Image (spheres, helix red, strand yellow):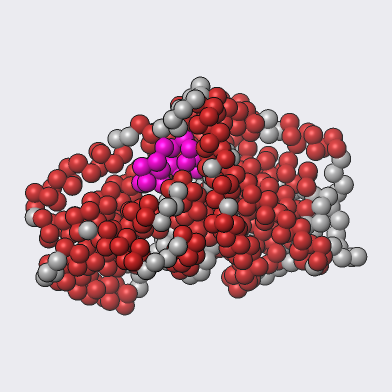
Amino acid sequence: MTVETGKPPVSTTPAILPADTRSRKPTAKALIIGFGLIAVCLVGLFTSTSNAMAGMWCVFLMLVLIFLAVPVALALSIPSIVGVFAISGAPASMNILSTAPYNTVASWSFSVIPAFIFMGMLLTQSGMTTRIYTATDRWFSWLPGGIGVGTTAAGAGLASVSGSTIGMTYTLARAGLPEMLRMGYDRRMAVGTVIIAGLPGALIPPSILLVVYAGIASVPVGPQLVAGAVPGILIAITYAIFILILALIFPKLVGRTKDAKKGPKVTWGERFHSLGQVWGFPVIMIVLFGGLFSGVFTPTEAGAAAALTALALCIFYTRKNQPLKQVSQAAFAAVASTAAIFFIMIGAEMLTRLLAITGLAQIVTDFIVGMGLGRIAFLMILIVVYIILGMFFDTLSMMLLTIPILLPTLEAMDVNPLWFGVFVILLGELGMITPPVGILSFIVHGIAQDPEVNQGQKISLGDVFTSLVWFLPVSVVFLMIMIFFPEMTEVLPNLMESMSGGAPPE
């Protein structure tokens, strides 16, 4: 196949960043309505007769600010500070302002976040992403729907060295869409394959979202990271099998017709040569997972070692193309992304303190427990709730808005917090493709407007959303499997604990 030799630009807005890092300009009418709602919320807050009612007005104010395109960090922080001031006075609000920023991010375990981001940026700069895609295509192209299967495999592989869903989707769309369309794939099949191929990236380590969740839920970072590996790999395999089945039942969807174009025959020599081009990939996996499971590294040390390995690989791969410039670009992008994440986490900590003062979290827990729901019914309702939330919020925003409220309920429902972290992040990633926000859908649609990508075909936003109707049910079925077989998230954490000889490492 033909893969672009150019690398996508290093993005300072990976998938874990919220919608406020993207351009959203509310209309004048929306601003007038929004400011009116803000005034109503403030009046309600300062005239509330109970702490719980004051907390509800703060939550409403938070949602209004988010819909007005106020950065999520500020939308979390401002209502929390104002709410604490209204309930407990100026000293309490000053206490939050003076202690929350430091106490939230001054954790040694969170230092793995910039390490993972830096590692992903370095590997993008080094061109590893295109090499992985080339290798997976050459090994899977012989299958019915092989390019689609290879794209899915590439998504899983890129997840293991990146952790940025948007970065992976960009790469896969630029490399995979023109190739699938050239081979006669239905345009909806092609865009759908590209969109879902990036979803396992939030689960397969290194996953920054799982690290953030571990901080919010107060669970060990190491076990939480590896808990996502098996589900992430399994959902990638599930997507690949679904594409293969579609190709066998409806061969026209993947261009398998008598007059379809045939790609160049791939030799075994080319397949093994492509593996030689991605030798750095297993090296990083050995450093990261080998260090974790052997007990040589803590999760934080493993992240640092993997980043150092990626630095060496980036310098090696770009040794003839200004390596210091590539490293500096990756470093600046990593600093910007890390700062944005920490700012949002500070806002989430302020929200958590507000919920503690108002007692809203306990009220929600008592309400859900009082409904008499079992674990399965509770989680099925959450699937519906999160899919609806996903139409308006991104993954990180949903996590920060809901997890502080749901944590006491999870304990009452006997839901393993490690399992729930994987579950809620996969739900959030599905929200990244559902309209009307669906940032991944809009990214792929935008890339598909490039004549070099669409191969002369018109790909509308309707085509993109139609393709999702084919693939979303597969994702929901996988979520149901996770509910009935939660053990899939426990295999590697248990193995990690047994190999480390006791308590799970922080």
Residue 64 shows in this picture = yes
Residue 119, how many percent across, how many down?
51, 35
- Residue 238 to residue 233: above or below: below
Residue at image coords 50%, 26%: 500
From which residue to which does the magenta span run? 206-225
Q: Position of residue 289 (x, y in %)?
A: 56, 31
Q: Is residue 113 above or below residue 78?
A: above
Using the image as rendered, state which of residue 317 and residue 258 is in the foreground: 258
Q: Name the dominant secondary structure of the magenta segment.
A: helix
Q: Is residue 13 visible?
A: no
Q: Is residue 59 above or below residue 302?
A: below
Q: Nearer the viewer, residue 326 or 404?
A: 404
Nearer the observer, 496 or 211: 496
User: Exactly how many numbered labels are in the figure?
Assistant: 0
Indicate the position of residue 377 as horizontal and vertical percent values.
48, 65
Residue for point 35% across, 73% down:
27
Magenta-colored stretch includes residue 400: no
At which x and y percent is residue 193?
A: 67, 59
The quadrant in which the C terminus is found is top left
Which residue is painted at 49% across and 48% down in the image? 419
Rendered image quadrant of residue 252: bottom right
* Residue 433: quarter of image: bottom right
